[in-house]
Image (cartoon, grey):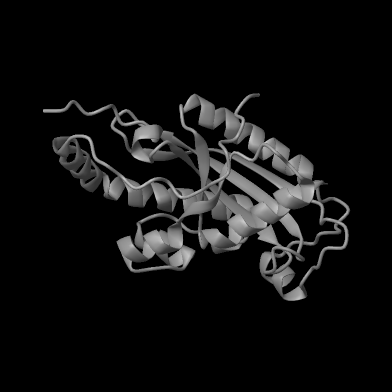
Amino acid sequence: MTALAPITFATRFRGFLPVVMDLETGGFNSKTDALLEIAAVLLEMRSDGTLARGETHRYHVVPFPGSNLEPASLAVTGIDPHHPLRPAIPEEDALQRIFREVRTAVRNAECTRAILVGHNASFDLNFLNAAVGRTQIKRNPFHPFSCFDTATLGGVAYGQTVLMRATLAAGLEWDTGSAHSASYDAERSADLFCAVCNQFQGVFEASRRRLAAMGPLEVDPEPPSEPPADLGP
């Protein structure tokens, strides 16, 4: 029987490191609407291969010049972009700080790059990619188009796609007063992602044994992507 490699982030997610992100914005158009908050939650893997929420990195962001701010979006998030006590930094600075932490985590996990986890993840990935394009950052550690969506995972595992409902259905706590901040929503999405992955741990183990018994497989090539990010310091 073929010996199975130890479970690591690299073996669990095909060389990708899941990083949970939430971006609070001034609207729904990633090209024109402001990025206002960004949070990234790193994950930890226990000795048995199950996942747990790790460190959170969160920044308030200065709206980029000429960006749009929709009043309806600001009413939902409760963000006042122009409050004098708001500790906001330029989006290039915020992204560089987040990416630095993510690159370190990718390197420590012996993965090739990060993959964004989010609730309705394509929204966050679109805004992240748009901000990277505006700032012309070259060392983006995230996969440019693949992601894990906790709305989909919550629907599969618990029959709920709204973050609050899926979180409660998973037996986790929810504080409505804290919702719609980047750090809180990212942390709840991280808890939900961990709960789903841990619930399906037995399925993953069975699939590993099944594939190992088949021996080497001929697989289709990966779809075209950007070159792997430089993961230096």
Residue 181 appears anywhere in the view: no
Q: Is residue 173 left or right of residue 75?
A: left
15 left or right of 56 in image: left
Give x and y (percent) for residue 107.
53, 26
Q: Within the image, what quadrant is residue 31 found in?
A: bottom right
In the rendered image, the vertical position of residue 208 relative to residue 224, given as above or below: above
Q: Residue pushed farthest bottom?
A: 72
Q: Quadrant of residue 172?
A: bottom left
Where does residue 5 sit, x and y in percent of width and height? 27, 27
Position of residue 106 in the picture relative to residue 70 (left or right): left
Residue at image position (60%, 57%) is 124
Report whether residue 77 is seen.
yes
Q: Quick check: 3 left or right of 106? A: left
Locate the C terminus by quadrant.
top right
Q: Nearer the viewer, residue 109 or 20?
A: 109
Numbered marks: total: 0
x and y percentages locating residue 90 in the rendered image:
81, 46
Toward the viewer: 172 or 193?
A: 193
Where is residue 168 drawn, in percent x and y? 40, 61
Quarter of the picture containing the N terminus is: top left
Residue at 59% x, 62% y: name it. 123
Q: Residue at x 81, y 51 (%)?
A: 86
